[in-house]
C-alpha cells in the first residue's frame, strides 16, 4: 500500500495562518515575519516558501505575501519614525528590494568625458 504522510495543508491550518496577521503581536513579535507565520502554523519555514510557489495553495500563498507586505510597511514606518534600530531595519528592508548605495558620476566637470589634461612645466631657469 503506497502512501505518505498526510499533508499538513488543511482548512484548519489555512484558518490558523489567516489569524497570524491579527495575532503576531500577542506572541511578542514587533513585525510580522514568514518565520513567525511558520511557527504559528506549526510548520517549517521552508514549507512556507514551498507552498508560496504551489499554485494549488494560492490562499496560503496570498496570506504569506500579505505577511511580507505588512512587514515591509511596518519596517519602513518604524525606521522612518526612529522606533526601530536603523541597522536592523536596513538589513530587513534589503529583503524587500531596498538598498543603500552611492552612485558615482564619472563625467568630467564640463560633462565632455574628456580626460583632464595634466602638464608638467619645468621651472624657469633650469
Image (tube, helix red, strand yellow):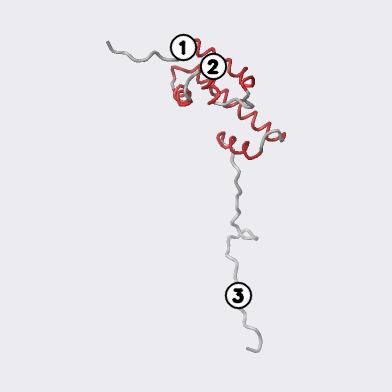
Closer to us: 87 or 105:
87
The image quarter in which residue 31 lies: top right
In space, the residues marked 3 and 1 are separated at their CA atoms by 78 Å
| Helix, strand or loop at mark 2 | helix
Image quarter of the N terminus: top left
Determine crowd level at label 2: few under 14, some 14-19, many 20+ residues with C-alpha closer than 10 A: many
Decide which of tag 3 and tag 2 comes sooner along the chain. Answer: 2
| Helix, strand or loop at mark 3 | loop
Query: Which residue occupies the extreme left position in the image?
Result: 1
| Numbered label attached to residue 10 | 1
Residue 86 location (% of width, % of height): 66, 39
Describe residue 46's horizontal placement relative to residue 97 as left or right: left
Residue 83 location (% of width, % of height): 70, 33
Residue 18 location (% of width, % of height): 56, 15
Determine crowd level at label 1: few under 14, some 14-19, many 20+ residues with C-alpha closer than 10 A: few
Identify whether 9 is placed above or below 113. Answer: above
Disc 3 designates what residue? 119
Determine crowd level at label 3: few under 14, some 14-19, many 20+ residues with C-alpha closer than 10 A: few
Residue 78 location (% of width, % of height): 68, 32
Disc 2 designates what residue? 17
Q: Residue at x 51, y 14 (%)?
A: 14
Identify whether 104 is placed above or below 37. Answer: below
Query: Which residue occupies the extreme right position in the image?
Result: 81
Image quarter of the C terminus: bottom right
Identify whether 65 is placed above or below 9. Answer: below
Amino acid at each position: 500500500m503506497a502512501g505518505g504522510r498526510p499533508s499538513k495543508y488543511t482548512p484548519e491550518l489555512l484558518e490558523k495562518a489567516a489569524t497570524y496577521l491579527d495575532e503576531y503581536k500577542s506572541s511578542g513579535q514587533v513585525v510580522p515575519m514568514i518565520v513567525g507565520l511558520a511557527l504559528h502554523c506549526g510548520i517549517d519555514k521552508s514549507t512556507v516558501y514551498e507552498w508560496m510557489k504551489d499554485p494549488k495553495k494560492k490562499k496560503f500563498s496570498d496570506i504569506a505575501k500579505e505577511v511580507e507586505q505588512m512587514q515591509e510597511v511596518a519596517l519602513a514606518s518604524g525606521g522612518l519614525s526612529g522606533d526601530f534600530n536603523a541597522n536592523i531595519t536596513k538589513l530587513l528592508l534589503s529583503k524587500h528590494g531596498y538598498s543603500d548605495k552611492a552612485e558615482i558620476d564619472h563625467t568630467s566637470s564640463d560633462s565632455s568625458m574628456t580626460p583632464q589634461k595634466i602638464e608638467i612645466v619645468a621651472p624657469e631657469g633650469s
